[in-house]
């Protein structure tokens, strides 16, 4: 499925709508360049699960946990691109749990992601316009 967003609110809304198709245990891998709208999209997903707090990319903390209707784990692989380091941190435990996992910059740990991972690609087209491709 492909969607076009012309502003951050629409990007968030597309994420919000996707939340209804996500279930416990799902892993969502979101790729896109810096500033593509990954965190905005994730905020929409979290809002779709009833989360109303702040949503920030865990660029420096690596992992954020959010409690809503479901526990949602938000992982950002941008600052730590070494797969062995992720294995040492215990990322496999997260991937095999019963939480919802959302990963930014998943290409750095792609080798350990299960086949049932939901892939999302956000392409920056212009200042506010984005193409969002969702592979369920």
Image (spheres, rainbow, N blue to C red):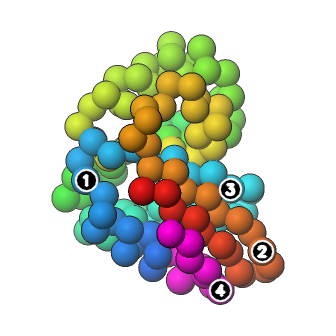
Instruction: Judge whether 4 appears above or below 53 on screen.
Output: below
Which one is nearer the viewer's eye here, 4 or 82? 4
Q: For the residues labelled 1 and 4, say whether their Cβ atoms are less than 8 Å apart.
A: no
Provide the secondary structure element on which disc 1 rests: loop
Label ID, residue 125: 2
Label ID, residue 32: 3
Disc with the residue nearer the chain's start (2 vs 3) = 3
Crowding near pointer 1: few (<14 within 10 Å), some, many (20+)? few
Provide the secondary structure element on which disc 4 rests: loop
Check the image and name the residue furthest to the right: 126
**Cα–Cα span, label 2 and label 3:** 11 Å
Check the image and name the residue furthest to the left: 69
Crowding near pointer 4: few (<14 within 10 Å), some, many (20+)? some
Q: Quadrant of residue 38?
A: bottom right
**Cα–Cα span, label 2 and label 1:** 30 Å
Q: Does the magenta stretch include residue 80?
A: no
Which one is nearer the viewer's eye here, 120 or 70? 120
**Cα–Cα span, label 1 and label 4:** 28 Å
Q: Residue at left 65%, top 86%? A: 6
Side (left or right) of 57 relative to 128: left
> Residue beneath label 1, please?
23
Provide the secondary structure element on which disc 2 rests: loop
Disc with the residue nearer the chain's start (2 vs 1) = 1
**Magenta extent:** 1-12
> Residue beneath label 4, please?
6
> On the rendered image, what quadrant is the C terminus found in?
bottom left
């Amino acid at each position: 499925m492909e969607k076009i967003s012309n502003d951050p609110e629409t990007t968030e809304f597309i994420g919000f709508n996707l939340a209804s198709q996500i279930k416990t245990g799902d892993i969502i891998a979101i790729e896109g360049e810096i500033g593509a709208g990954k965190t905005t999209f994730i905020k929409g997903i979290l809002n779709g699960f009833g989360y109303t707090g702040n949503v920030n990319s865990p660029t420096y903390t690596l992992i954020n946990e959010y409690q809503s209707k479901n526990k949602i784990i938000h992982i950002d692989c941008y600052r730590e691109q070494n797969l062995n380091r992720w294995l040492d941190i215990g990322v496999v435990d997260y991937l095999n749990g019963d939480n919802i996992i959302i990963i930014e910059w998943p290409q750095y740990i792609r080798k350990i992601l299960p086949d049932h991972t939901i892939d999302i690609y956000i392409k920056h087209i212009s200042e506010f316009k984005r193409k969002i491709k969702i592979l369920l």
